[in-house]
Amino acid sequence: MEVTVIGAGLAGSEAALQLAKRGINVKLYEMRPKKNTGAHKTEKCAEFVCSNSLGSYDITNASGLLKKEMELLGGELIKIAYDSQIPAGNALAIDREGFSEKVTQKILNNPNITLIKQELKEIPNTPTIIASGPLTSEGLSESIKNFTQNEHLFFFDAIAPIVEAESINFDIAFWQNRYNKGDAAYINCPMNKEQYEKFYQILTTAPRIELKDFERDAKFFESCLPVEVLASRGIDTLRFGPMKPIGLIDPRTENENYAVVQLRQDNSAKTLFNLVGFQTNLKWGSQKELIHSIPGLENANIVRYGVMHRNTFINSPKVLNPTLQTRNKKDLFFAGQLTGTEGYTESIASGLLAGINMSRYLDKKELLLLPKATMLGALTQYITDPLHEKFQPINSNWGIVEKIELPKKERKNKKLKAELISKRSIEYFQNLII
C-alpha cells in the first residue's frame, strides 16, 4: 500500500509519520525550496513560520487538553515538541529550528517515507492526504477548487517581528511572567501614558504594505489580528489586549505600568525573542521606527520583520466528514490549516487524525469518529458541520466541546468545568483501542 501526502508542514509531517509507523509506504511531496511560499524561510519539514509557541500545556486550557489527547493518540510531533521545549511559563514554546531539524531527520531516516521536493499541481488518483497548508500553490489550489466545486475562502495571517536579546536594554526591560507564575520566561518593556500615546501615534499613522488586487477584501482571523488592526479599534484596545499591564509589576518600582510589551523566547540559545501579539503588515521602515519607540527596544537589532500573507482554506462543511475524509472521494483526506483549523497544535492534531484514518481506510476498518466530548472530536465536528453558512477558521476552545452538567451552585466555576471535561476526554482516549 502507498499513500501520497502533499505538504511537509506540521500536518503533513504528522500524517506521514502516522502512516509510516503502520507499515504504509508514503510519498511525501514538498514544493520548497523549488517553489517558496513567501512566509517560509527554510526547506525543512514542519517549519514554524509565525509564533514559536504551541500554546498552553495545562489540560484545563483548551489547547492543553488537545495536546494531551495527541499524546494519548500516539502523536509523533508532540513528542518532538516537548523534546525541543524552551522556557515560556505555562506555554509549550519550542526552538523552532531545532524542532524542524528533528522532524526532518525523523522523516528522512524512515524507510517507509520518500520525501520528494516537487510541486504537485493536480490531485492524484491514488490514496492521498492533502496537507498543503494555508499557502497552497496556485496550481494545486485550482485543482482543489475544481474538485470541491466551491470557491476557496481566505483570511490573512500576520507574522510578528523578532529581535536579538543582547540588544534589549535591561535598564528598562525586566523579566517576569504575568502574576509571577513559574520561573520568569518573558521580557517585559513597560510604558507610561506619554510613551504609550507616542507609540500609538506611530502605529496608527504608519504606512502599510499595499495589498494586491486579490487581497483587498481581507478577512482577518480574530485571534491573529495585525497589531495595527487592533489599534484601529480604539486607543485603549491594545492596553486590554497584547499590551495589557495587569499582573506585571516591575520589581524595581513595584508599580503597575500603563502598558507593557512582552517578548517571548524564540530559540533554545535565548538569543532571539519575538514580540508577543505584534503580528503586523506595516512597511519595514515603519516597523523599525515603531519597535525602537518601545522603551527597552530603542536600540533593538531586528532580525526578522513582520509580514502578512494570504491564508487559504476549503469550505470544509461542504467537503469533509468529521473523519477528515472527503465526502465525494473515499481515498482523499484533508488535514491542517487548509481544513479551517487554526493554530499549530490544531494543525498537527488534524494531521494525526487524517493519518490514522487513512490507514484504517486502507485496512478496511471503520474510520475513527471522535465524539464532541473530546477536544479533537469537537474541533473536527465543528469544521465539518454542514449547517455552517458562513464558515470561518477556528481553534480549540471550550465553546465547541459537549457541555458537562454541574450542580447549580457550581455552574459558574469555569475551572471545575474545564477539569471535568478534561478528565472525561482523557478517560475516553485511555480506553480507546485503535
Image (cartoon, rainbow, N blue to C red):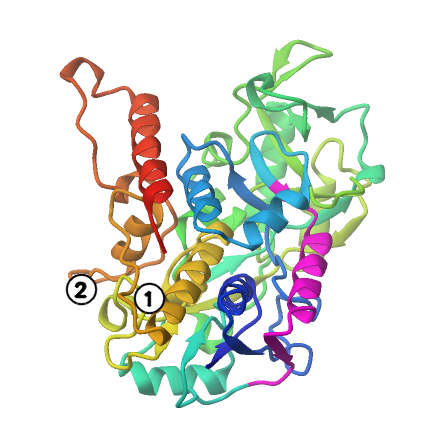
Magenta stretch?
93-119
- Quadrant hosting residue 262: top right
Amino acid under disc 2: Pro
The verdict on residue 97 being magenta is yes
Circle 1: is it few (<14), some (14-19), or many (20+) Cα within 10 Å? many
- Quadrant hosting residue 407: top left
Which quadrant of the rendered structure holds the C terminus? Answer: bottom left
Q: Is residue 180 visible?
A: yes
Residue 386 is labelled as 2
Percent across and percent down for residue 178 are 57, 23
Query: How far separated are the C-alphas under marks 1 and 2?
Result: 13 Å
- Residue at point 46%, 84% (across, down): 140
Percent across and percent down for residue 129 are 43, 74
Residue 324 is labelled as 1
Q: Relative to 340, does residue 328 appear above or below in the rendering?
A: below
**Dot 1 and dot 2 residues touching (CB under 8 Å):** no
- Quadrant hosting residue 393: bottom left
Q: Nearer the viewer, residue 138 or 2?
A: 2
Q: Relative to 293, does residue 106 appear above or below in the rendering?
A: below
Q: Relative to 115, does residue 159 appear above or below in the rendering?
A: above
Percent across and percent down for residue 181 are 58, 20
In this rendering, position of residue 107 left or right of residue 301: left
